[in-house]
Structure formats: structure tokens, C-alpha cells
Image (cartoon, rainbow, N blue to C red):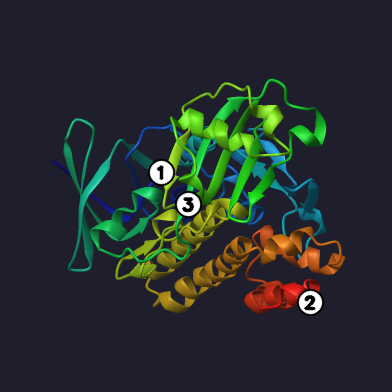
Amino acid sequence: MVKKEYDVVIIGAGPAGMVAAGYLEKTGVSVLVLEKQFFPRFAIGESLIPRCMDNFAEAGLLEDLQKQNYQKKTGARFVKNGKVVEFDFSKKFGEGWNWTWQVPRADFDHKLAESIQKRGVLINFGAEVVSARWENKLWNIESKDPNAVLSRITSRFIIDASGNGRVLAGMLKLEAPAKIYDHSSIFTHIKDEDRPQGKEGAQISFEIINRGAWFWYIPFSNGTTSLGFVGENDWFHTFSGSKNEIFKQMLDQCDFYKDRFSKQEYLFEPVKLSGISKNVQLLHGEGFALAGNSAEFLDPVFSSGVAFATESGLLSAKLVARQLSGEVIDWNKEYTEHIQKAINVFATYVKEWYTGRLQDIFFTENASENIKMQICSVLAGYVWDNKNPFVRNHDKAIRNLHNFLYPEKFQ
């Protein structure tokens, strides 16, 4: 059994973990990353939003990512009953990035990890955390490699960025009821050989099938395209057969995209995820912080997952670096309140999407350009800007606007 000592152990080498590692490496803190899988490996969460770019830049990762020529994402398109609405990130309220990327996550996460390794941070791939105990102000961690060889590691802090693995949330019994219930997802990739030229073949699009179900189209620069559906479980239960058959049946319910993809071969059998929303009782505790999906995941409709991951990974790294240097950190105020603010804003938008109010607002012909810019800023991930009324008063702003635009639906 090998024993090693580190200032910080990061569990998970996805975007949250790599942003945390990138920032900590710049401060001189000793870091070890434990990643259960070997890269490249498939992951979902392929559409980023502009706020991610700020975080990649601050962690020192942006330059390497820009060399990869990922598909540029300048906004998003929503389609419903023949109507089309577009949000252009360059026409948003306030400051911030006007673009980001659509990425095949297997390659994207691999490039992030390679960038971190070039800077001297050790990533132990294939390392599964089997126990973690907090004793005498230190974490005692045991991990095993694929040959069942155990390593014993001590660290002063753990950042759990294990994503859907939710390592500490499970070990410390921190799971909590999800904020968004009864939704599932199914998705696959295709080789998009008949992709249209120009914007039509490059822009991420969402087609609304009914109030509770929608389809995504995410084209990548390598010629592959991600296709997927999200919907209420009751809608999923209306389909039967193999996953391939179910996916084709769902495509038949699309209007805009049905003909384009009905005869495409899938690169892998569609993957179904049930109960996609996740939640925890707390985001931090003595000697640890939860980042990314290991803490919270709402819904993929506004592509907020990687933004939460990079924001929480970066902020937790900043705070632990200060703490290890001797500063007393109020984690509730500086971490939980900051992350929870973003969660609350996006939770409102996700819930109001599925009530139908936000869908009505998106497709109205009567909303002002200024209001659209304010909503666009939220979709870009700038959810801490209290100058934006659709951030500051997110729940009331949506309801009041909907009541104004659709008085006949006033409830």
C-alpha cells in the first residue's frame, strides 16, 4: 500500500476538477486528482454557455482549448409549431463573453486533462475512491486501481468533482430530494453526413414537442452530431420497444427535424438516463466542498451544467487556497450563497420552462428587445448580475411578464 500526502485531493477529472486543479496549480498548492475512469471517455453535457469561458481563462486552460477548433456557439435556437426564436449572445444585457463552444465531451475532457498534466499535476486514472475519513484535521483516503492495488492518501482538503459518481455525497449521506422531478433523457450521436452548410448546420437547436418534452440538436466541428430528448417520465412511458426503436418513435413526434434524421444510423445505442435532476443537503463541510454535478444538477434545457461545474470548481479552489494559507473562510457566505444564487435563478427558469410560461415568453411577438436581452444574459450564464431584473427578481419577473403578455392565462 502506497501512502502519499497532498494539500488537496480532487475527485474527478471533468471540467469542475480540471478548473479547480488549474487554479490551484498556479498557487503552488500540492494537488492530486483521482479519476475512476480512463480518458478519453464518453460524457454528456456537450453544450457550454459563455460564463464557462471566464472560468477556463482564470484557470489557465483557455489557450489550450482554443487550439482545438471546437464548434463555436454564438447563441441558441428554439423551435415550436413552426415558429423559430433565436437568442444571440452578442445581444445580451451587460458584459461578458459573446460566444462559447459545442463540444464532444470525450475529446474536450481529455484535452482539459492533458492541459493540466502538462503543468505537472498528477492525475491517477482508474483510481476509485473506496473510503474517505476525516480525522485530526486530515482526510484519510483509500483508492484502488483496476488491479485492486490500494493507495492510502492524506490531504488537508477534498474537492469532490466526481460528477454523477457523487462520491462524497454518497459516503457522507448528503443526498437530498431533487428540485426538478420526474424527468428523463435519452441521447445518441450520428455522423451528420448531410449537414447543411452555414448557420443551419452549426447552430444548436431545441425543438419543443410538447410543454414537457423537447429535442436537442448539437453539431460538433468534427462532423458528429448529438441528438437527444428530455421529457417527463409519463411521456417516456408512452413509447415501447428497444432504445433504438424508442428513439425513432420520438423522432417521429418532431416536426422540424423528423425528416432530416429519421433514416440516420446511430453511432451507439441510445443511452437513457432516468431521474436526471440531483441535489444535496449542503455544498461544503469541514475539509471538503462539492463541485459540479456531484452537488447539484437541474436539467439540460439551458445547458447550465458545465457552467455550474466550472464556477463551483474555480470558486472552491480559490477559497481552499486562501484557507490553506491561514485565512479564515466563511464558506457559507463565500461559497454556498454564491453557488446557490445561480442554482435558484436557473431553477426558476427550468421550472417556468416546464410550466409553459417561459416557452410562451420565448415565442411571443410582443416582448421588447430589452427584455429579450435581459433573458439572453441569463441563458449565457451571467446569473450574478443584480442589475438585470431577470436575475434580481427572477421568479416575479417571469410571472409578471407572462401575466402582462397573456392576460387570458392569468392564474
Q: Give whichever of discs 3 and 2 has the lower sequence position.
A: 3
* Secondary structure of the residue carrying numbered label 2: helix
Can you name the residue that lies furthest to the left here?
Answer: 1
**Of the pair 233 and 99, the residue shown nearer to us:** 233
Q: Position of residue 203 (x, y in %)?
A: 73, 40
Q: Residue at the spot x=42%, y=32% of the render?
A: 39
Quadrant (top left, top right, bottom left, bottom right) of the N terminus: top left
Tag 3: amino acid:
Asp
Q: Quadrant of residue 212?
A: bottom right
Quadrant (top left, top right, bottom left, bottom right) of the C terminus: bottom right
Q: Which residue is mark 2?
A: 404
Q: Is residue 308 visible?
A: yes
* Secondary structure of the residue carrying numbered label 3: helix
Q: Distance between the Cα atoms at labels 3 and 1?
A: 46 Å
Q: Which residue is mark 1?
A: 121
Q: Which residue is mark 3?
A: 234
Image position of 269 with respect to 395: above or below: above
Q: Give whichever of discs 1 and 2 has the lower sequence position.
A: 1
Q: Distance between the Cα atoms at labels 3 and 2?
A: 31 Å
Depth check, mark 3 against mark 2: the one in front is 3
Q: Quadrant of residue 190?
A: top right
Tag 2: amino acid:
Phe
Q: Position of residue 45 (x, y in %)?
A: 53, 45
Depth check, mark 3 against mark 1: the one in front is 3
**Mark 2 packing: few (<14 Cα in 10 Å), some, or many (20+)?**
few
Residue 74 tag number = none
Instruction: Describe residue 204's horizontal placement relative to residue 338 as left or right.
Output: right
Count of numbered marks: 3
Image position of 329 with respect to 165: above or below: below
Q: Give whichever of discs 3 and 1 has the lower sequence position.
A: 1
